[in-house]
Image (tube, grey):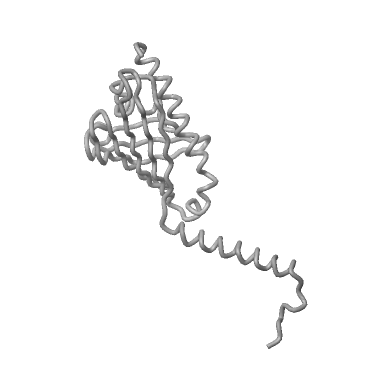
Amino acid sequence: MRDKFRDWNIYHKSVVVLLSAMVFGVIVRAVIVIDTAFEIADERVINASAEKIWSLVSTDSNRDKWQGEIVALAKLTGPTTEKDATRLIFWRRGLKRWQSVERTRDILPGRILNLYQTSDQDTRWVSLTLEVISACQTKLSINEIIEPSAYKDRFWFFKQRTVHENRIVASFDAMERWAAIDDPNC
């Protein structure tokens, strides 16, 4: 059998291999993100008592003060500290606005708060964990798993990852400011 690529030099063959690898990579990525979610996690030590941090984390009237992109919360069925209680959350990022319904999944008062948020654009599983380091130092860990609803948003999520990471960093910065105002002893 005659070699069809006999006249091609090594440059042409390498271009074909490179293009084939790129097409294969796009196909693999397309299959992987069919049903996937992305994790965003961060933690920070805040100079405030665990009780003060817990009141900011678990009280509906305080959440929009420190949690990035949240404009307002409306209680639907019970307070945040009650299991299976629901809230309506209003979000804003730049000019984009949307709403989600949040449900308290699990709670260990003073330490762990697990939330489930669903909207037209994504579903989120949020875990807020407090760890006491000293009387005036508390480590707050935020772990978010985000599953965009639209396939194109899952495929291109890596472009939006920094937006979500910056939102969490801004939330920590706001938490530190509010904790310093509300807990001046620390």
Q: How many marks?
A: 0
> Nearest the camera: 61 or 34?
34
Residue located 47% across and 62% down the image: 31
Percent coordinates x, y for residue 19 in the rendering = 65, 64
Residue located 47% across and 39% down the image: 164
Percent coordinates x, y for residue 54 in the rendering = 30, 26
**Residue 185 versus residue 38 in the image, above or below:** above
> Nearest the camera: 121 or 154?
154
* Quarter that holds the C terminus: top left
Percent coordinates x, y for residue 94 in the rendering = 52, 34
Residue located 40% across and 16% down the image: 180
* Quarter that holds the N terminus: bottom right
Specify whether 20 is left or right of 57.
right
Q: Give residue 39's quadrant in the image.
A: top left
Percent coordinates x, y for residue 3 in the rendering = 71, 82
Specify whether 118 is left or right of 16.
left
**Residue 115 versus residue 182 in the image, above or below:** below
**Residue 34 versus residue 118 in the image, above or below:** below
**Residue 19 versus residue 161 in the image, above or below:** below
Q: Give residue 16's quadrant in the image.
A: bottom right
Q: Residue furthest bottom?
A: 1
> Nearest the camera: 47 or 123?
47
